[in-house]
Amino acid sequence: MKSVGERVPKLDAADKAAGKARYVQDLRLPGMLEAKVLRSTVPHGRIVSVDVSEAWKVRGVRAILTAKDIPAKAWGYAKDTTALKGDRVRRIGDELAAVAATDIEAAIEACERIKVVIEPLPAVYDIEATLAPGAPVLHESKGSNLVQTHHYEHGDVAAAFAKAAKVVEGTFTLPAQQHAALGPVGAVAEWDANGRLTLHDPTQIPFLVQRDLAEALDISPADLRIVQPAIGGAFGARLDLYPHEAIAALLARKAGAPVRLLFSRDEDFQTDPVRPRTIVKLRTAAAADGTLLARDADILVDCGAYVSWGSMTPVVMVNTFGNFYQCPAAKFRARTVWTNTQPTGAFRGFGNPELLFAVETQMDELARALKLDPIEFRLKNANRPEEVTPAGGRITSCGFKEVLEAVKAKLKRPAAPAEPHLKRGIGVAAVFHVGGGARIYRSDGCGATVKVDDFGKATVIVGATDIGQGMETAMAQIAAEELGIPVSMVRVATQADTDVRPWDVGVHASRTTFIAGNAVRLAAKEAKKQIEDARAALKLPPDAPVDKVVRAEHFRQKGRLISASAFYDPPTSMVDKANHGNVSAAYTWGCHGVEVEVDVETGQAVVKRVVAAHDVGRAINPMLVEGQIEGGVVQGLGYAMFEECVLKDGRMQNGFFLDYRIPGIKDVPDIETVLVETGDPEGPFGAKGIGEAPIVPIGPAIANAIADATGVRMREFPMTPERVWRELRNSR
Amino acid sequence: MKINLTVNGHAVALDVAPHRTLGDVLRNDLGLTGVREGCSTGDCGACTVLFNGTPIVSCLMLIPDAEGASVVTIEGLTKDGRPDPMQAAFVEKGAVQCGFCIPGMILASKAEDVPEGNLCRCTGYKKIQEAIREERRRTRPQA
Ligand code: FES
Ligand code: FES
């Protein structure tokens, strides 16, 4: 009975296609109130007063909260935020007050009647200017706008640059990118009579929300239960606790009724975390024979007004920086900064798309300068299986060579177009990413229980979260394969809450198939053993069906429950103070080859074709893996070509889908995916994580193809027609 | 105000405020939550319904304009528990990820080969295109 490797349709797809899946906006509880947050329209200022007396006069209002009514203790990664702001606002969108009412119109009207007086302070939006002496400081207790500096070094960088035949350098500028998940942000909170909170929350980290929200509410985590509805996309946006989750809970407690807080789309665009604006200054050196010698990076990353995961993107950058390619010397500094803008969070790829735009552009520049084929140059310096890197990374399975060769075989130079203003070119870029978890928290673990019932049906209860990628289906396939039963006989308890499910650190870092998959596999293996033990004890024949064995065991007085639990935490470590260590139990490589056509009169670059080759270890479900690759390619194409938050005086100017354009069906090029199966020794059935890697190389591959077509180097995303046209003009 | 329309083949009589949108009424008064609300500004297509057979974004249509119309939502595509061929093709071809865009995408695809007014942030559209082609192949073999 083969399940692993099959193109099993997603188990939740039929419900989703029938409109039956329930997202947070579909939840309705009896007596439920609707909530609205009053937000600052001032980017930086001192709050003088917030007067809610008129708001209470709106019919239907049941609760109003300001900072005075909630726990004052700051929370968050840098302990720099509260659910409602009391003394200062630090960005447009800061939460000043919140209202719960019987209907949303009443809540909105009440917010409009709240009188707020804010004394404006000078603000800073630019990520370089925010570190300049005299810049307004956002969090005075922190002394400056510098959040953190990350350092890394190996080898003798100065000597390597001195002896290099060729050195390239450049500054790369990356915009804020919106997750723009189609499902809106929101939460529904209800308290029971024992003072226990249930939060319906499409979060990526149910167990960490349990911890962090308890801190924000000043209650015990034991009194908190997180239930996840169907999640309408997340991509990293829901990897932290944000104020709205606390506000929903606080309003519900105050009102004594369930409260639903849903963002409008513009609220989502204006206030939910984004991929951080980033500036990468990079130098790369190579010897005349094409041996990579050294890299030196200096990076600035925006955190926005409050620190969330944006500040940790250098941790992933550094992992790539120290491990990717055989590079004998490397030096890295990244500083993360506060500015009076939207907070920045995790976003698929987590720093890697930002860093590798620079790294992979310079790989292309060096190959050209040294007159080497860009793929041969990469092959010469590629990581190999069973290698220990200078950063301490332990590489096991490695399909770098295979993905490079796959692209080389499939990407053909197109014929030159007849029209003289059209130029065609090809470009490649590669990616290195974690594929076996990522120990950025002390735990990288996940638990699972597999029970088999008297009807032969197996239920998988696992800590992992599905955000659309297909966790449920992959886990069912793994359990079915291990138990030797069809996938149709496996259910995954995706509706289960944190009271029922075992621990998991959350869905991030492409970790779920690898980590949760290993936990499920171990539990299923043990459950299988229990069944076989029962079969032997009961002297049932080898061909007696599973349901018969389990039933006989459960109906016997000294029988035993067929149910097994397992915990998997990968053999990795957190990085040390110098950012050395092996954070992942497996790594993954990919290469994208791209064909573009550039109109040199308008600057319009169109991606015609993409070959996306990825080392996936083993595809548990090739159809879902292809879906991850295609989705990542197109999201990365949006980031590279047209997505950008246009900021003016701290306000996003294009906070609608009409103006903030994400790729539509007509923007999609011909995409060919190539799955390279290296069979990872630690991965479940050889699998490695693949959720993030595909968003990374597409951007630099396009930039390299534009350079191939026109001779012009793009060092800023998005590569809009205007920017390309300007570079073309400057190059003349 | 009083409104009469046909929803998924059933006659429906409503008494609702005239400033409300068709999408809001379908979702919140009739419980047809398969009509997704992704933006409320007509830009994402998640709230697509078939309006007298033509896909429209229901978040922009005011309820008085729906008087007498026949509206089909995603719930109305499933007949006797059997999925519509387009729903089946989306499932089989792996065109569903988070699923939020999918009801609107499926309804638009019933009428359009290239549903360009419908956004999807997850799939990259390739498997959506494959699903549409597959449905066309199955339901219009001659075309
Ligand atoms: S909700 Fe109607 S188009 Fe987005
Ligand atoms: S499947 Fe998630 S938006 Fe389309």
Image (cartoon, helix red, strand yellow):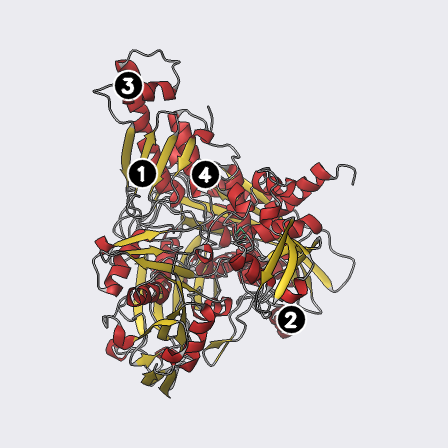
Tell me which numbered mark, 1 or 2, is placed earlier along the sequence.
1
Disc 2 marks which amino acid? Trp
Camera-near label (1 vs 3) is 3
Label 3 and label 4: CA atoms lie apart by 28 Å
Numbered label attached to residue A534: 3
- Answer with mark 3 or mark 4, whichever residue precedes in sequence: 4
Contact? badges 4 and 1 (CB < 8 Å) = no
What residue would you read off at disc 1?
A448
- Along the viewing direction, whichever of A390 and A339 lies nearer the viewer: A339
Q: Earlier in the sequence, mark 2 or mark 4?
A: 4
Q: Position of residue A32 (x, y in %)?
A: 39, 61
Question: What's the residue type where badge 4 is placed?
Answer: Thr
- Name the residue tied to disc 2: A725
What residue is rendered at 51% in x and 35% in y? A8
Q: Height in image: A269 above or below A129? A: above
User: Circle 2 sits in a helix, a strand or a loop, which is it?
Assistant: helix
Are both tags, 2 and 4, on one chain?
A: yes
Question: Which residue is identified by label 4?
Answer: A473
Residue A33 image position (x, y, % from top left) = 39, 64
Tell me the crowding category of disc 4: few under 14, some 14 to 19, or many 20 or more residues within 10 angstroms, Cα based.
many
> Label 4 lies in what chain?
A
Report the chain holding disc 3. Answer: A
Front position in the image: A307 or A325: A307
- Mark 1–mark 2 distance (CA, rounded to whole Å): 54 Å
On whether disc 1 and disc 2 are found on a single subunit, the reply is yes
What is the C-alpha distance between the residues marked 3 and 2? 73 Å
Residue A133 is at least partly visible in this image: no
Say whether residue A588 is left or right of residue A197.
Answer: right
Q: Judging from the image, what secondary structure is the residue with disc 4 in?
A: helix
